Structure formats: structure tokens, C-alpha cells
Image (cartoon, coloured by chain):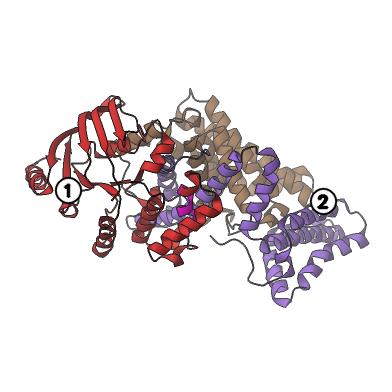
Chain colours: A red, B purple, C brown
Amino acid sequence: MADCTIQFENVSLSLNARKLLNGVSLDIQEQRVGVIGRNGSGKTSFARLLSGLLAPSSGRVRVNGNDLFKHRAAALKTVGILFQNPDHQIIFPTVLEELSFGLTQQGQRKAEAMQNATKILQQFDRLDWAERTIATLSQGQRHLVCLLSVLAMAPPLLVLDEPFAGLDLPTKTYLQNLLYGLDQSVLHITHDLQALAEYERVIWLEKGQVVGDGLPKHIIPNFENAMAQIEQI
Amino acid sequence: MLALTTPYQTIFHRWPASLKVVMLLTFTTGLMLIQTQMLLLCAVGLPFCLIASQGRGYLWFSLKLLRALWPFVAIILIWHFYTADLQSGLSIILKLAAAFTFANLVTTTTSLADFSALIEKAMAPFDGNGAQGKKLGLMIALTLRFIPVFVERASLLRLAHRARSTKHGTWRIIFPLALSALDDAEHVSEALNARGGAAPR
Amino acid sequence: MDKNVVLVSLFAAVIAALGLIPKITLISGVPITAQSLGVMLCGTILGARAGAQAALLFLGLTALGLPLLAGGRGGLAVFASPSVGFLIGFPIAAFVTGWSMQHLARFSIGPASALAALLGGIIALYIPGVIGLSIMIDKPLLASLALVAPFLPGDVIKVILCAVITRAIYTARPQMVLAKSLQSAPDAAAQTAENPPQKDIAR
């Protein structure tokens, strides 16, 4: 299994006078980590800081010892992030082009990138998808393309920002099982508490701060109770 | 995204794109300069002979494409009927049809990939480290990727409108469509950034 | 700049998608398409440079053979047709619209975009359009102008629509103030992350 250490040292993030994260300190070495919280609790900012897409207003974020915001080349080799909507992430009109893109970004030559992209399609038994246009794929299939494009870059850490919302049960189960069997470390932000049952650690964010951190069997019931008691949205 | 190619195989499919484009430019320029009737008739006949040499199917296909010109043909015919100068009217129409048909010949026998390769080659002397070419390639891909997305979104918007109104309102969808494009741009540029950005490494 | 690359590409796609909206026929019997409205919007929303680039990208793809023009037309042949002047006018129209918009920034959005769309989407579009037409069908300029005159009322409607839509866009996304002050991707992305836009329509 790929090793990955994540360090947040007293991290705060403010944008436009809104405090999105407030003094978050975490040391993460587990392979399967879940992050839960209400909308607006800072989960997405957390994911973006982790991937090096944002820099903290104060504090330090390090993944495997690297500052991923400053060192984008290292970022491409370290973390792959999956967002919620495939239509917001798929850039190319055909599957093979999409998969090859990340590889050329990592420095591979075009021919080599296409070869490796074909390999990963083969690995997941989707060789016939190579020439298909994205427009002909279903939502679940597009989610898979997003996952494969990130996996093709072989990052040790996978950050998932609610990637399976809106999918039907069989598709979601399929993709989640796929995820579970992966070598890389996975940090999964989700509203789907069931999916986190087998994870090693769950972090609960509320209003930009960590209010819960531990085993799923402890954190999730607390979270559910707290959510059930909220009377106003 | 279907390019305007033809199901009929022709010898022109095998000719290099650069050759076809140069031929087209030469032909249309020459056509504009021709003054004598005889020469005009020969020149106009050229694209049609080329097409006819490839079989009835391709000929018929190409002739059908000419339908797009009918409003202009009608205007010219009517005009020249009134000025009693049908001959020059006909020569204008023939020139138009010939240029149009030659251009269609090039388009229908050249794949998108071939055109892209031609553009890359043409840009190469001006494009030091390949950065501009890469950016252009990315932009073409992005546009092709999102055309079907916006087309589908437009029809969904129209459905949503129809579900709440008896009026046409086809044009009411333009605002939400443009807005969604702006929003999508935010997300896509983030996704692009997450995978290294448009700049070469 | 990543953001620019994406905006230009996406708006080129918007122009293409607008070509597929069914034409509306005016009382005069003249059909009007939404595509030139898309070009005007590229100018008012993206500004001169990016707007022109979007229109140019759209034209380039049409030239490569994609049936992106209203009516499913495309390929090099459309540049050999009498309306070639209007096609060449697209990027010019977008540029002039955007340029006017940037110089009218002190006025309120509605009138500013109406004036910009008028200058760009009608005047700057019709000049090359009429010239091109007159060359291709070998008729005097004034005659060609008379031939396209029936389309003017439709284009005036588009100018008004452009103003309405542009104002709505600026109201809905106040942080997206004209292309000249495009925010960098991370800032804007984080903003939209914490203030997510309305539900995805495409779901």
C-alpha cells in the first residue's frame, strides 16, 4: 500500500473576509480517512488545501513533506483529486485523450502517454472506451473516466470531494468497491455515512474546525445525533 | 461531434491536407480573376469533373450540398431578370457554385485530425517551445468537449421552461446557458489547474 | 492564464450551441438565429480580446468542417458563400462590442451593453458583411445593404436581448466584472466552492 503522510499545522483559510477554516491541526497517516460535516463546514476548502490548489492564510499544509501549493510538479505526482461533477472535470472530448492528458502534464511524451492510458483502460476492462466520446457515456461512466484519469497518474493520495453524489445504488456500489481495493491512500469527503463504515478514521468538520476525530463507530453516531437535532437550516 | 465528412470514399481522401488547401486557395483566387467566358466555363467545370470522377454517389452528395446557396441564387436570378442581364447573373452563380463545391470537396475529404496536424505544422515555425500549439490544442478539445454539454443543457432548459409556461420562450434559455458556462469555467479551470494547468512543464 | 483559456473555449462552445436553437421567424417572414447574439455576449461578458478569441475559435472550428453554423452548416464552403463577410465579421463584432463595453464601464450595465452590442453586433458586423456580400454577388454596396436590411429589425431585438441578458449576468455574478479583471483560478474557485452556484441544470 502506498504511504502517505498529511500534516496540517494550525491552518486557517480566509477568503473575502469569510473564515473558511480556523486553526485546523491534523496529522494523518491512515490509508482510509473519511471527512464529514455540513455544507459550508470547510470540507471543500480542506480538500483544496490538501491538493495544493489553495494556499492557507496561515499555518502550514504538507503532504509527504511537500508544500503542494508551491511545488505543482510534486503535487501532480502526489495527489489526485476527484470533484463532484464529472462535467466540471473532464476536459477532452474522447476518453483516451482525457486519460492521456494528465500523463503528458507529468512529462510523458504523447505516444508514451497514450500507451499508458490504454494500459489503464485495459486494467479496468474498458479497452473499448478508448475512442468513445464523453458525450455518449452515462453519468456513472463519466465518474469512472474521472477516476481513471486520476489513477493513471498514479498518485499515492486520492482526495475525493463528494464524487458519488447523485449516482444510483449499483453504480455507487461499484465505484466504491473499486475505490476500496486501490493501493493508494484515500481521503473521502462525503455525506454518505454508510460508505465510511470500514474506514480507519473519520474527521468531523464544523464551521471550519475539527469537532470530531476518531473511529467511524464513534464519530458517525455522534454526528448523526447532532444532525438530527438541528431544527433550522 | 460529427465533422462534415462523407461516407463515400474518394481518391481525395488520400491527398495531403496541405495540397488540398493550396489547390482550393489557388482555384478560388483564379476564379475571381477570370474574365473570359470560355475560360470561366472550363474553370467552373473543374470541381464538378473532379467530383464526378469519384462516382455517382459522391456527385449526388456534393450537388445536394449546393442547396445551401439557393437564397442567393434566387436573389441573383431575380435581379438579373429585371435588369435583363441573365448572362452575367449566370456567371456569378456559376462562380459561386464552383468555389462552394471545391471548398466542400476539401472539407468532406479531410478529417479533423488531418486539419489539426496541418495547423500544427503551419504554426511550428512561429511557435518556439510548442506552448502556443499546446494551448490551441487544449482550447479546441475543450470546445469540442463542451458543445454537446451545452446543447443538452439548452434542451433541458427548454423542457424546464415548457413545463411551466405555455409560451415559446426559446430565447429565455440563453441567460441560464451563458451563466452556466461562466460557472463551468470556474470549475474546469480548477480541474485543469489540479492536473498541471495549460502551461507546459 | 488558465482561466482565460477555459472561458474562451467554453464561450466558443456557447456560440455553437446557440446555432442549434430553432430559428424564430419575424412577422416580416425573416428568420433570425441566436448565433450573432452569442457573439455579442462574448463581447459584453468576456471583453474585447477574449470575446474575439472565442468568436475566432468558433470560426476556426467551423472552417475545419464542423457543422456549427445555424442550420448545420460548416466547412470551408461557408467561406466561399456570399455570407462570408458576416462570418469574418464575427470576431470583429465581438472585439468592438467588448472594447466599447470596457470603455463604457462607468455607465450602468444595461445601456452600456446595449450601445456596445449596437456598435459591435450591428455596425461592426454589417460593414464586413455587406462588403463581402457585394463582392461575392458582384453588386454595388448600397444594393447589398438593401438586401440585408430585412434582417436589421431582428438584430435590433438581439441588441436589446443582449443588454437584458448581460445585466442579468452581472447581477448574478458580481465578482465576474469584465474580462479585463478576471480573477485568478484559485480565488474564484474557492469562492464558488463556498458559495456554490445554483443546482446543476444539466443533471
In the foreground, A232 or A28: A28
- Dividing the picture into quadrants, the one containing residue B179 is top left
Residue range in magenta is: A90-102
Q: Image quadrant for the C terminus of chain A?
A: top left
> Residue A200: which disc?
1
- Please state which amino acid type lies under the numbered disc 2: Thr
- Please state which amino acid type lies under the numbered disc 1: Glu
**Share a chain, discs 1 and 2?**
no
Instruction: Determine if residue C2 is in view.
Output: yes
Residue C57 horizontal/vertical position (percent)? 59, 45
Residue C23 horizontal/vertical position (percent)? 53, 56
In screen coordinates, is C113 left or right of A123?
right
> Does the magenta-highlighted stretch encompass residue C129?
no
Residue A182 horizontal/vertical position (percent)? 29, 55
Main secondary structure type of the part rendered in magenta: helix
> Residue B29: which disc?
2
Instruction: Determine if residue C33 is in view.
Output: no
The image shows a total of numbered marks equal to: 2
In the foreground, B129 or B184: B129
Output the chain of dot 1: A
Q: CA distance from mark 1 to mark 2?
A: 72 Å
In screen coordinates, is B111 left or right of C141?
left
